[in-house]
Image: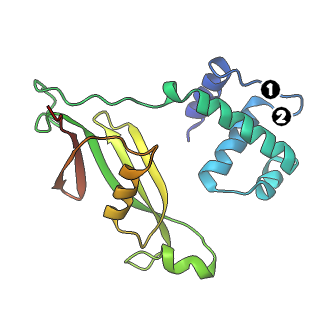
Amino acid sequence: MSRNAFAKLCLLLQTYGGLEDSRHVPLSSQVAMFLSVLAHHKKNRTVKYDFIHSERTISKHFQRVLNIVLRLHPMLLIHPTPVPPNSNCLRWKWFEGCFGALDGTYIDVRVKAQDRARYRTRKGSIAINVLGVCDRDMRFIYVLAGWGGSAADSRVLRDAITRPTGLKIRRVRFLHMSYCLVLTYIDEE
C-alpha cells in the first residue's frame, strides 16, 4: 500500500468512522497494526515486537479498527453496474450486461509440514487459491481467499456462490477468454 493510500484510509476511518488516537497508540499505528495482521497473517505475538506494544493492546486496537471498517462497509464496498447496451468503450462494448470479470490466482504461503499437501499447486509450489471479481472499472467487488492451492478453480467458485455472504448472482454465463472468466448477470423475466 502506498503512503498516500494509507493516509487516505486513516483519514476515512477518522472522519467517517470516528477512529481516534488513544492515549499511547496514534491512529496511524492502529491502522498499521490492523493492516499488518490482515495482509501478512501475523499473530499478535509477532506484531507486538514490530510495534512494541503488548498483545492485549494489539488485540484491542485490531478489534477497534475492524469494527469501524465493518461499520463503513457500505462506503468501502463497490456496487457494480452492468455494461449498458449503448457502451462505446472499446474494452467492454462486446460484453453487454456484464458486471465485470473474475479470475483465480495463487499466492505463495508458508504452512506447517503436515498441511503442505493441501496447499501444493499443480506446479509444485505451496500457495493459496484466491478468487477475485472486478467490476468493469477494474475495482475489486469480491475476493475469496483461503482455499488450498490443490483446490480447483471450479470448487472455489462454487464455494463463493453458495456461501450465505458470498458472491450474489441469479444466473451465470461463463465465457472463457484468454484465461479469464467473464461474469454476466442474466435477468430472468
Residues 36 and 63: in front is: 63
x 50%, y 24%: residue: 75
Expressed as whole percent of the image width and height from the top left, the position of residue 77 reads 46, 31
SS at circle 2: loop
x 65%, y 28%: residue: 10
What residue is disc 1 on? 21
Residue 52 visible here: no
x 19%, y 57%: residue: 178
Q: Is residue 51 above or below residue 98?
A: below
SS at circle 1: loop
- Asked whether the residues under the numbered discs 1 and 2 touch, taking CB atoms below 8 Å apart as contact, a structural biologist would say yes
- Left or right: 83, with 138 as reference point: left
Query: Which quadrant of the figure contains the C terminus?
Result: top left
Q: Is residue 167 above or below residue 75?
A: below
Name the outermost residue toward the top. Answer: 15
Query: Which quadrant of the figure contains the N terminus?
Result: top right
Residues 178 and 135: in front is: 135
Q: Which mark is residue 109?
A: none
Q: How is the image coloured?
A: rainbow
- Left or right: 161, with 4 as reference point: left
Quarter of the view holding residue 129 = bottom left
Spatial CA distance of label 1 from label 2 is: 6 Å
Residues 157 and 164: in front is: 164
- Left or right: 66, with 135 as reference point: right
Dot 2 alpha-carbon crowd within 10 angstroms: few under 14, some 14 to 19, many 20 or more: some
Expressed as whole percent of the image width and height from the top left, the position of residue 142 reads 41, 43
Residue 2 visible here: yes
Q: Say which amino acid is labelled 1.
A: Asp
Q: Is residue 185 above or below residue 116?
A: above
- Left or right: 28, with 185 as reference point: right
Q: Say which amino acid is labelled 2.
A: Val
What residue is disc 2 on? 25
